[in-house]
Amino acid sequence: MNTFYDSLQAIHARIAQAKAQVGRNDTVQLCAVSKAQSAEKIRLAFEAGQTIFGENYVQEAIAKQSLLQDCAIEWHFIGPIQSNKTQLIAQHFAWVHSVDRIKIAERLANSRPTGMPPLNVCIQINSSEEATKSGTGVEEMFALAQTITSMPTLKLRGVMAIPAPTPDKTLQHQQFRRVHEAFTMLQQQGYALDTLSIGMSDDFEAAIAEGATIVRIGSAIFGTRQYATLT
Ligand SMILES: *Cc1c(COP(=O)(O)O)cnc(C)c1O
């Protein structure tokens, strides 16, 4: 039994509880956010049963991936995307949650190696109406969805958002509900989507109540991050 077994079990219990509270019987996946965590810790979490890991920084992720090649991990890229990093992302990840503009989608599509399955993509939307936050507005979301689905090397799976953190539960629900509405609008346009990527350590129960199909949880599994090691 390793150190992460108990914390992962505790998260799974909270996910189950949050689902039960709203009568959900479908699956909510857990993406363990391992940015700023060592390859050793990721290996322990993998050995404790966790298979999906989320990373924000390309170079850091690739360094850890090379140490964990023997682990059947599904790597998700969840951080902001600079255009000079699209090729590495397309080569080293199964999923990208944070696509928020057409140029990035095109670059990822053109860099996805032909031997690999299509790159699973979520559109990151800005649900908080904060001009500084990354994520596309609802208007541009439709054009982006059309671009992504026109590319055979990409597979549009759904929508992701990082609402402004708030301890106010009502506001958490409101913000997640807005993301779910955007997701529903895309479905109504005919897009076959199955992924609503919302919820982090401090708000994932509200996200599950509002329909999250995958929650991205870091500190509640691994403990507080050492940001200083990241620069
Ligand atoms: C860091 C991060 C998370 C996890 O945050 P915690 O509060 O540690 O759970 C989730 N999603 C994204 C996009 C992140 O950057």
Image: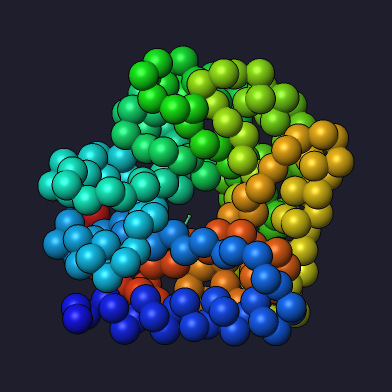
* Residue located 26% across and 62% down the image: 46
* Residue located 22% across and 51% down the image: 71
The image shows residue 125, relative to residue 139, as above or below, that is: below
- Give percent across and percent down for residue 116: 38, 25
* Residue located 75% across and 48% down the image: 183
Residue 27 can be seen, yes or no = yes
The image shows residue 184, relative to residue 168, as above or below, that is: above
In the image: residue 129, left or right of residue 101: right
In the image: residue 207, left or right of residue 2: right
In the image: residue 148, left or right of residue 180: left
- Give percent across and percent down for residue 66: 16, 41
Q: How is colour applied across the structure in the image?
A: rainbow
* Residue located 41% across and 46% down the image: 76
Q: Dividing the picture into quarters, in which one does residue 77 lie?
A: top left
Residue 86 can be seen, yes or no = no
- Give percent across and percent down for residue 52: 39, 55
- Give percent across and percent down for residue 227: 27, 63
Q: Nearer the viewer, residue 9 or 35?
A: 9
Callout count: 0
Q: Residue furthest front?
A: 25
The image shows residue 178, relative to residue 124, as above or below, that is: below
The image shows residue 172, relative to residue 14, as above or below, that is: above
Q: Dividing the picture into quarters, in which one does residue 165 lie?
A: bottom right
Q: Where ligand 1 lies, by image quadrant?
A: bottom left
Name the quarter where the N terminus is drawn. Answer: bottom left
Q: Dividing the picture into quarters, in which one does residue 103 lie?
A: top right
